Image: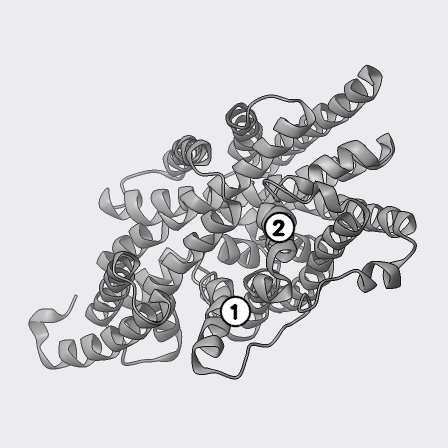
Amino acid sequence: MRNTFALLLASILFYLAATIGIGFWAARKVKGSGDFLLAGRSLPIVLSTAALFATWFGSETVFGASSRFLEGGLFAVIEDPFGAALCLLLFGYFFARKLYNMNLLTLGDLFKVRYGKRIEVIASVFMVPAYFGYTAGQLVALGLIANVVIGIPVWQGVVISAVAVTLYTYVGGMWAISVTDFVQSILIVLGLVILLITLLTQAGGLPVVLEDVPAGTFQFFPEFTGNAIVHWICAWSVLGLGSIPSQDVFQRTMSSGSAKIAERSCYYAAILYLTIAILPLLISLCVRHLYPTEIHGDTQVVLLNMVIKHTPLWVQMLFFGSLLSAIMSTTSSSMLAPAALVSENIIKPLTKNRFTDKQLLYTTRTSLLVFSAISSSMACINSDIYELVGGSSILSLVSLFVPMVAGLYWQKATGFGALLSMVSGLSCWFYLEFYPASLPSMVYATGLSAIGMVAGSYISKRYSFLQI
């Protein structure tokens, strides 16, 4: 037993060391902030697709979604993976080419070009907080892995994991993320497929597993009532629309070698993501069938405990390697995204472009360390992965989605309209979180954001003192 544990631990430590090594290797390509944030806009279709596929394939997909699926069936996981795949499809069709051809460094730059420098800073301030919860969710998952495999407290696993991910992201930036995403994506697919085949073999095949599935598990569409339909649409919208105005999706897409690659990689990644994200759901059904007595307590760690107790060592090594791959790739980009916004769209304009490129690169790396520390603290406080990740996307939806769409597709949109849209949407959402209404708060908040955009734009056109 000790030898098994030692080999498993050694394989995990080796993987962490190899990932950090790749980060240092990729650092040779980083000559300035453009290389650090967008990999020099030179990624081929394979690396670009892998990077986009890895955007969300982390803790929420493997832990959060499989846990919710066990509790509520397919209807409970509309948000992810289905909403996440929808986001990539929409981003590829409506946004990828337009944004790529604008030659922007960050998503905040869109608000500067379209609405002015003041709105650039304000919009970036609105974007940044969403990443704390998202990054914390990934770190919780890494802490859970350390807890199950090594036996250390979750918070210690969070800290150790944060140090490892921060180190290779700090050194190599988007180049490190892109190269490691490619390697990690291969491990993710390989590990999950082999684990699923192993479990299906033990269970006697897929038909046997499906016969044991509770009624309603595969219900996909809601009941034909107004309230149910609205909740169903909201589930699609959390990631499907809420993640469109996000720096991590933007920077992964804009790192592509051309506008054509940017668009196509979104489509390929959406198909790949939806296909591979189904595997953890099927694996959770196998676990329920094979070990029904173990489906209790924190369902987020059921899969981990099952792999440790009931699979051969080589399966454990491959599974935990692929799992670390998935989560680390997501964590690294969610750390880099807000750091980029702070340095390029908050500090840079506030200092009136006095910083050199090297100073901005140093600022980005320093911001990365700060975000890592804050997210780690949040991960030690709240351990609900699905809640941490979902909440971060809602913030972007109610405040930034409408101004972003209007900035690209409505010529009459103004800076005051964008400001009113962001403030009214977020304020409404916060209010309804404390004083709930009959429908989800994001419905009213997004609607009010749209009204603020239209009303603010027309009013500011009429009254010049409102022009920003």
Can you tell which mark lies on residue 111?
none
Q: Quadrant of the N terminus?
A: top right
How has the structure been colored for display? one colour
Q: Quadrant of the C terminus?
A: bottom left
Tell me which label, 2 or 1, sits earlier in the chain: 2
Say whether residue 65 is left or right of residue 105: right
- Dot 1 crowding, Cα within 10 Å, few <14, some 14–19, many 20+: many
Judged by depth in the image, the label closer to the viewer, 2 or 1, is 2
Judged from the image, the secondary structure of the residue bearing numbered disc 1 is helix
Residue at (26, 74) in percent of width and height: 453
Q: Position of residue 57 (x, y in %)?
A: 63, 51
Q: Position of residue 244 (x, y in %)?
A: 47, 64
Q: Quadrant of residue 222?
A: bottom right
* Front-most of residues 208 and 399: 208
Residue at (75, 56) in percent of width and height: 282
Residue at the spot of label 1 = 236
- Dot 2 crowding, Cα within 10 Å, few <14, some 14–19, many 20+: many
Identify which amino acid the numbered label 1 is placed on.
Trp
Residue at the spot of label 2 = 67
* Front-most of residues 213 and 97: 213
Q: Quadrant of residue 451?
A: bottom left
* Front-most of residues 193 and 303: 303
Say whether residue 372 is left or right of residue 294: left
Q: Position of residue 375 (x, y in %)?
A: 43, 36
Q: Is residue 368 above or below residue 199?
A: above
Q: Position of residue 67 (x, y in %)?
A: 62, 50
Tell me the CA gap for discs 2 and 1.
Answer: 18 Å
User: Which residue extends farthest front?
Assistant: 293
